[in-house]
C-alpha cells in the first residue's frame, strides 16, 4: 500500500528540462507501486531528448499491476509522453488487459486524452497510489489558473471488480478518467474477458444526486457516493467516490466506511469534476489514497 506525491516542473525549455519531467512521471508511477514491463521500444529515460519542440513524441512507458490477480486478470497501463502542437507537455494513457510485448495494448482498451497546458509550469503537484488492486493517478494537479473543468494534465483511476466485502475479484476492472464528457469522449469503461463488450460511459457509473441538488448534507453529516462496474452484472468499486465539491477541502484526505471497511480517499477537487450528470461542476472525484 503506497501513496506517492511529487512536485516537479513541466517544461520543454531544453532537452534537460524535458528529461526531468519525463523521469518525474515515471518515478511517481513506480513509487506508487506499479511495475515496469519488459515491452520493447520503451522510452529510454537515461537519454536527454534531442527533439523536444512542437508535436514531438518522446515515447511511451508500459506498467502492470503487482498483485496476484495479474496472472488471471492482467491490467496494463501505457503512458505516452509527448508535446502538443505548441510544444507543451502532454501525457496520454491507455489501459488494457493485454500487450503484444512491443508497446501495443490490445482492444478492448480505455484511452485517456491529455489536456494542453498553454504555458510551462514551474511547480505542480502530482499524485499516484496503488493499493490492493486499485491504481489512481492525477498528474499536474490544477495546472490551469482559471479553468475549473477537469483541471489536471492527465487523471486515471483503475479498480478491480469487488465483492460485497470489498475483496478484489478476477472478473474485470473499471477505468475512469478526467476526460471531458463529449460525444467523442468517455469518462469510464468497464472491461471484462478476453473479448469483452467493453462498456463506455460519458459519466462515471455512480448513484449520485441529480444536478438539481446543491448539497448532500443529512443533519450534521455529508454523503459520498460510490461507483460501480459491469462485469457483466454490477459490482461495486473502491477506486473513487463522488462528492460535493463544497463539502470537502481539496487534497485533504478523509476516511469513510465502504463495503464494510474503513478506507481513505483524497478529494482532488476540480482536477476531476464534471464527474456526473451535474454540469454545474459541483460533483468531484475523490481517489483512493492509502
Image: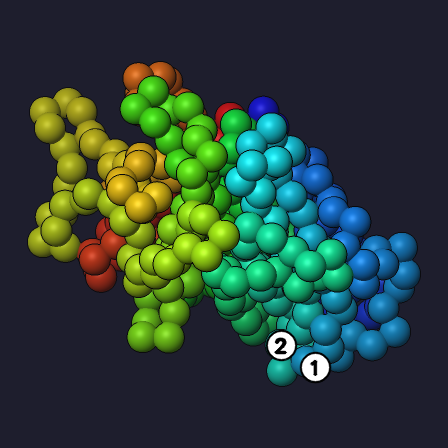
Which quarter of the image is occupied by the N terminus?
A: top right
Q: CA distance from mark 1 to mark 2?
A: 6 Å
* Residue at figure coordinates x 65%, y 56% from the top left: 99
* Residue at figure coordinates x 37%, y 64% from the top left: 186
User: What mark, if any, has residue 84 been given in the picture?
Assistant: 2
* Residue at figure coordinates x 32%, y 72% from the top left: 182
Task: Mark 1: give few (<14), some (14-19) or many (20+) Cα within 10 Å.
Answer: some
Q: Is residue 89 left or right of residue 157?
A: right
Image coords of residue 285 (percent x, y): 36, 45
Task: Mark 2: give few (<14), some (14-19) or many (20+) Cα within 10 Å.
Answer: some
Q: Nearer the viewer, residue 173 or 56?
A: 173
Q: Is residue 121 left or right of residue 168?
A: right
User: What mark, if any, has residue 248 been given in the picture?
Assistant: none
- Per the image, label 2 sits on a secondary structure element best described as loop
Whether residue 101 is visible: yes
Q: Is residue 72 left or right of residue 176?
A: right
Q: Quadrant of residue 14?
A: bottom right
Image coords of residue 236 (percent x, y): 31, 35
User: What mark, if any, has residue 54 been given in the picture?
Assistant: 1
Image coords of residue 263 (percent x, y): 40, 23
- Per the image, label 1 sits on a secondary structure element best described as loop
Image coords of residue 18 (percent x, y): 78, 64
Amino acid at each position: 500500500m503506497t501513496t506517492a506525491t511529487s512536485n516537479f516542473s513541466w517544461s520543454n525549455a531544453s532537452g534537460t528540462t524535458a528529461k526531468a519531467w519525463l523521469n518525474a512521471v515515471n518515478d511517481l508511477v513506480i513509487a506508487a507501486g506499479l511495475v515496469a514491463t519488459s515491452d520493447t521500444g520503451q522510452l529510454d529515460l537515461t537519454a536527454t531528448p534531442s527533439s523536444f519542440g512542437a508535436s514531438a513524441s518522446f515515447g511511451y512507458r508500459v506498467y502492470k499491476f503487482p498483485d496476484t490477480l495479474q496472472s488471471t486478470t492482467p491490467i496494463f497501463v501505457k503512458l505516452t509522453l509527448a508535446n502538443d502542437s505548441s510544444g507543451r507537455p502532454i501525457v496520454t494513457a491507455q489501459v488494457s488487459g493485454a500487450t503484444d510485448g512491443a508497446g501495443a495494448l490490445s482492444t478492448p482498451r480505455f484511452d485517456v486524452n491529455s489536456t494542453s497546458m498553454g504555458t510551462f509550469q514551474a511547480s505542480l503537484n502530482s499524485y499516484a497510489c496503488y493499493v490492493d488492486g486499485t491504481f489512481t493517478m492525477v498528474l499536474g494537479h490544477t495546472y490551469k489558473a482559471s479553468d475549473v473543468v477537469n483541471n489536471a494534465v492527465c487523471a486515471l483511476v483503475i479498480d478491480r471488480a469487488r465483492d460485497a466485502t470489498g475483496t478484489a475479484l478476477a472478473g474485470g476492472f473499471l477505468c475512469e478518467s478526467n476526460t471531458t464528457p463529449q460525444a467523442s469522449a468517455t469518462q469510464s469503461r468497464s472491461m471484462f474477458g478476453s473479448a469483452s463488450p467493453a462498456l463506455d460511459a460519458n459519466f462515471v457509473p455512480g448513484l449520485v444526486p441529480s444536478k438539481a441538488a446543491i448539497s448532500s448534507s443529512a443533519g450534521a453529516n455529508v454523503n459520498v457516493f460510490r461507483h460501480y462496474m459491469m462485469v457483466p452484472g454490477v459490482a461495486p468499486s473502491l477506486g473513487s467516490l463522488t462528492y460535493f465539491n463544497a463539502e470537502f477541502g481539496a487534497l485533504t484526505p478523509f476516511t469513510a466506511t465502504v463495503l464494510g471497511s474503513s478506507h481513505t480517499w483524497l478529494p482532488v477537487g476540480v482536477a476531476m469534476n464534471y464527474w456526473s450528470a451535474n454540469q454545474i461542476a459541483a460533483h468531484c472525484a475523490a481517489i483512493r489514497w492509502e
